[in-house]
Image: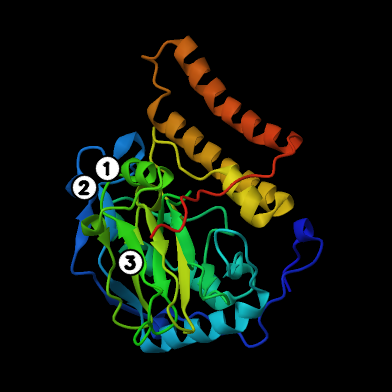
Amino acid sequence: MIDAPALHLPFEKLETDVAWDPERHIEITPPEQVVLLEEWGPEAAGPTALSPVAITGPFRFLSDEGAESLRAICTKLEGYATGMERIPKKLRGSIYRSAFLRGMAFDPTILAFLSELAQVRLEPHPVQHHAVHINYAPDDLSLNVDQWHHDAVAFDYVLFASDPRGMQGGRFEYYAGPVEEGRHLLLAGEQLPPEKVRSPEFPAAGWAVLQQGHRVLHRACKLEERHPRITVVNSFWAPVPGVDDPTDLPTMLKIDGREIALTEWSRFQARVAAHRLEHFAATRTDFSRPLPELQADLRQIAAALAEAADAFDRDEEGSLIDYGAGS
């Protein structure tokens, strides 16, 4: 078991877990396509994009043995799944329960491959509840697996742990246009233009797409008949100097609860501050800069940490990014 004081009880680790072995579990097949944000128009990147990439076509990084181990582990973990309004059946914090999932999330070979696809350096997300989030098929077939939304993380992959072949419905869809444009249509009760809604074809279990999740509007549709649909969403941090990361506290408060959220938030903010200080020390501390500028930079970093600490004093419920089921 992993001691987790913030939960008032330990995470129970799987008794029949599998040790992560990159020699046996990794097999990389690159995507045939990488879609750039500029292909969706000049507004698609916005001021917050961390790279030019929007989303890739399907790719593979798990061997057959790796994919089968992932499916088996996710199936065993389903008993811990819970639901909420936007996501009827999901599991968070999976890497605290499985060494295989932790190894997959932190593997340097996979990270290097994904960073090349993303065109920016990706790191395991400091909010480890964002690592290996698992979505399961809802018990109620009238519900989407997940509603239209954009993510509160820089990049993530959507990986089919189950075999999508023969599945009726349950498709992963994304809007091929600016997030703000699609959000405006959905919030106005309008239909997204069908020609702008895309759905990748996943050949089998173990295949994934990588997306710059905060700049891609997407959903997972409802199933038309029962199918053991399981997808893994693994999130990443892309520390780019001068660009704020989209990770937010309200999402974590709502989905994970106050004690988990603030623990994870403190780790994330510590990593962000450390990165900013390292960048400041390496690039901003030459003798040509006036002292007031140095002081202002340091105070800005300190103010962000103070704001993060102040969140502990606020009693906030949080909220999820949710633009509804669509049509």
The numbered disc on residue 209 is 3
Amino acid at the residue labelled 2? Trp
Q: Residues within 10 Å of mark 1 (few under 14, many from 20)?
A: many
Look at discs 1 and 3 and give the one toward the viewer: 1
Residue 175 position within the rendered picture, expressed as x and y whole percent measured from the top left: 30, 54
> In front: 187, or 134?
187
Q: Is residue 106 shown to the viewer in this render?
A: no
Label 3 or label 2, whichever comes before in sequence order: 2
Q: Secondary structure at mark 3?
A: strand
Q: Secondary structure at mark 2?
A: helix
Label 1 or label 3, whichever comes before in sequence order: 1
Look at discs 3 and 2 and give the one toward the viewer: 2
Q: Secondary structure at mark 1?
A: loop
According to the picture, the residue beneath numbered tag 2 turns out to be 40
Q: Residues within 10 Å of mark 3 (few under 14, many from 20)?
A: many
The numbered disc on residue 44 is 1
Q: Which of the image's four quarters has the N terminus?
A: bottom right
> In front: 317, or 50?
317
Q: Is residue 292 shown to the viewer in this render?
A: yes
Is the residue 204 above or below the residue 128 in the image? below
Answer with left or right where residue 10 lies relative to residue 173. Answer: right
Residue 190 position within the rendered picture, expressed as x and y whole percent measured from the top left: 35, 48
Q: Do tag 3 and tag 2 residues touch (Cβ < 8 Å)?
A: no
Residue at the right extreme of this rendering = 8
Q: Residues within 10 Å of mark 2 (few under 14, many from 20)?
A: some
In the rendered picture of this protein, how many numbered marks are placed on residues? 3
Instruction: Tell me which residue sits at (29%, 67%) in the image.
Output: 199
Answer with left or right where residue 310 lies relative to residue 61. Answer: right
Residue 221 position within the rendered picture, expressed as x and y whole percent measured from the top left: 41, 68
Amino acid at the residue labelled 1? Ala
Residue 184 position within the rendered picture, expressed as x and y whole percent measured from the top left: 37, 41
Q: Marks 2 and 1, Cα distance to the nearest angstrom?
A: 6 Å
